[in-house]
Image (cartoon, rainbow, N blue to C red):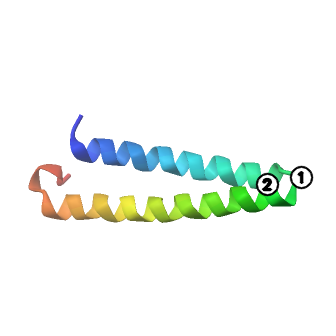
Amino acid sequence: MTVISNVKQSLSTIRGIEAQLSILAINSLDPEAQRTFHETMNIMNEIKKDLQIRVNEMMVEEPQYKQ
């Protein structure tokens, strides 16, 4: 598996985690748990953005990754 494939797989996994945290926040009855899930979801969103930027950089900088 290439480096970019690994990064894209990580990005996909993080998107799934972010979605699951959103569901947990919505379904939780405990306000503190809701806050925790929401805060964690926001952290995952930042990580997702950083990884997406890295994928974009790799596509531009590394000719072997151009589609």
Q: Position of residue 1 (x, y in %)?
A: 24, 34
User: Which disc, if any, is residue 10?
Assistant: none
Asked if the residues shown at circle 2 and circle 1 are in contact, with their CB atoms under 8 angstroms apart, the answer is: yes
Residue 57 vertical placement versus 22 (above, below): below
| Left or right of residue 58: residue 48 | right
Q: Position of residue 19 (x, y in %)?
A: 62, 51
What secondary structure is marked by label 2?
Answer: helix
Residue at (21, 39) in percent of width and height: 2
Nearer to us in this view, 59 or 38? 38
Assess disc 1: are there few (<14), some (14-19) or many (≥20) residues with their C-alpha within 10 Å of its C-alpha. few
Residue 1 vertical placement versus 20 (above, below): above
> What residue would you read off at disc 1?
29
Q: Tell me how far mark 2 sits from mark 1, CA to CA.
A: 8 Å
Q: Position of residue 16 (x, y in %)?
A: 56, 46
Residue 15 vertical placement versus 2 (above, below): below
Residue at (69, 54) in percent of width and height: 22
| Left or right of residue 38: residue 50 | left
What secondary structure is marked by label 1?
Answer: loop
Q: Residue furthest top?
A: 1
Q: Amino acid at mark 1?
A: Leu
User: Which disc, if any, is residue 33?
Assistant: 2
| Left or right of residue 59: residue 6 | right
Residue at (89, 52) in percent of width and height: 29
Residue at (69, 61) in percent of width and height: 38
Q: Position of residue 60 (x, y in %)?
A: 18, 64
Q: Residue furthest right?
A: 29
Q: Amino acid at mark 2?
A: Ala
Number of disc labels: 2
Assess disc 2: are there few (<14), some (14-19) or many (≥20) residues with their C-alpha within 10 Å of its C-alpha. some
